[in-house]
Image (tube, helix red, strand yellow):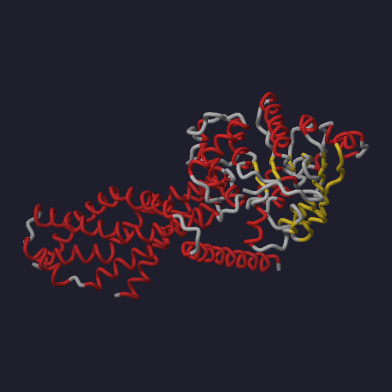
Amino acid sequence: MRMIERLGEAVIEGVVHLGNFVIFLLAAFVYTLRPPYKPRLLIRQLRTIGAESFFLVALIGMFTGMVLGFQGYNTLRRFGSEGALGTVVALVLVRELGPVLAALMVTARAGSAMAAEIGAMQATEQVDALTVMAINPVQYLVSPRLLAGVISLPLLTCMFDVIGIWGGYVIGVGLMGAPSGPFFNGIAQNMGSNDIAMGLYKALVFGMVVMWVCCYKGYHAARMATGVSRATTDAVVLSSVLILAWDYFLTSILL
Amino acid sequence: MTGNGVKDGPAIVVRELRRRFGKQQVLDGVNLDCPRHQITTIVGPSGCGKTVLLKHLNLLLRPDSGQIVIDGIEVTRLGLGGMDAVREKFGMLFQAGALFDSMSVFDNVAFPLVEKTNLTREQIAGFVAEILRQVGLEGMEQKFPSELSGGMQKRAALARALIRRPNILMLDEPTTGLDPTRTVAIHELVRNTQQRFGLSAVMVSHDVPQVFEVSDRVAFMHLGKIELAGSVAEVMASDNEHFQRFLAGKASGEEERPASQVVATVGR
């Protein structure tokens, strides 16, 4: 009997947590639409999440494109299809790797910082201080970050894609000797607005997921040092898992 | 800016407040009166529920049952908008100050004015300079909280709590963690500020018996109830066994709840 009780308790607790999780997102989203509006907070977050992630995203984009150039060339050469290298590199980046890897980089950098910052604020009663001053902490802390994530990630993804394609060109054509004309012609002929849209939809969703998960974990961190570190770890892990899982679902819907 | 209204009745009235966390009845029928323009100090052994009570007074927690009347308004059934209106009536000093560490002292103290009023920058700067002078932090506007000592952080936090001239000031263990000289300094600061602004103050403190010198009324809390309340003289003269034992520092094992247990349940 005790086991069934415990199982029941665990299920109920799990459902309550899930509910809180979703309500958190809805509240943060609704608060972006309600006054008081704080453009300065949004701009600050755009700088932290978007502008300051640019170098990292560019670096990873370059390496990813270069690896794709190598691998793509090696594989295509077996079928005599080196001319398709541009198409392959571009489509893989734009449809899949661009949004996913850019999101993972932003999670690792900005997402973890966000979870830690909000968690530390909880631990030192700064979030309570906001509440006591009649300022809604979710509206003040979370909504700007959510909005900044949704705006930044598609833009970062585009940069990732462009730099990646260039990286693929440098290695595939410059180093390995794939034909140069077909590289770009292939892209022009075989990539459509559907592909680009797919990548951007994914980036939008990922931007929301990363900010949502990281802010939630920080906000609900246990109020001690280990609580903050635990929250940061959980935030990055959960964000990464959700990005990859959602990637599958979105791909199956959009493809 | 909230003004000092002339009103009758105590600043804060608590009746039969009850609150449970999991299996623990942390507040078990609390009754308390905090008179206007006086400093009421709540004392008691660790784990008696003092901080939980204060969190109900500053509306961070809601009770299971009972009533709280703040400045004439019953607050336990209010919605979010109503609660925000009541929050403008009091300022809160948290135990560690709870200053925003990404902002300078100036931005911290100006924060309530910037966020909640339409004052111009010059006006705000004037008010901030004035309140910093009154708490003894003149010239510290550009420092960041991490550059301040514990005592100075509390002064800055006190300035932030008072900048909108509330009627009521709530303090959570303002002297915990400070050495005896700083403790006296903070107690004096609280008393001076309370007299200058005519505040009604509610303070939770561990610093017994030093805090009695700065209190007008004392409420002794034990196992979730206010067992003893009155002026300092009345309370000191009482023969309440738990209180005398508490004063003597011999709180027995079963009267104290381990701090970790209370902190864990009061996490939010």
x 44%, y 56%: residue: A144
- To which quarter of the image does residue B251 belong? top right
Toward the right, the furthest residue is B239
The answer, for residue B13, to whether it is visible in the render is: yes
Q: Residue A47: where, in percent of width, then height?
A: 36, 50
Q: Residue A234: where, in percent of width, then height?
A: 48, 53
- To which quarter of the image does residue A77 belong? bottom left
- Is A24 or B140 nearer to us in this picture? B140
The answer, for residue A119, to whether it is visible in the render is: no
Q: Is residue B94 above or below residue B247?
A: below
Image-based side of B122 in relation to A175, left or right: right
Q: Is residue A17 above or below residue A230?
A: below
Quarter of the image for the C terminus of chain A: give it: bottom left
x 31%, y 57%: residue: A101
Toward the top, the furthest residue is B181
Q: Residue B99: where, in percent of width, then height?
A: 56, 40
Q: Residue A228: where, in percent of width, then height?
A: 52, 47
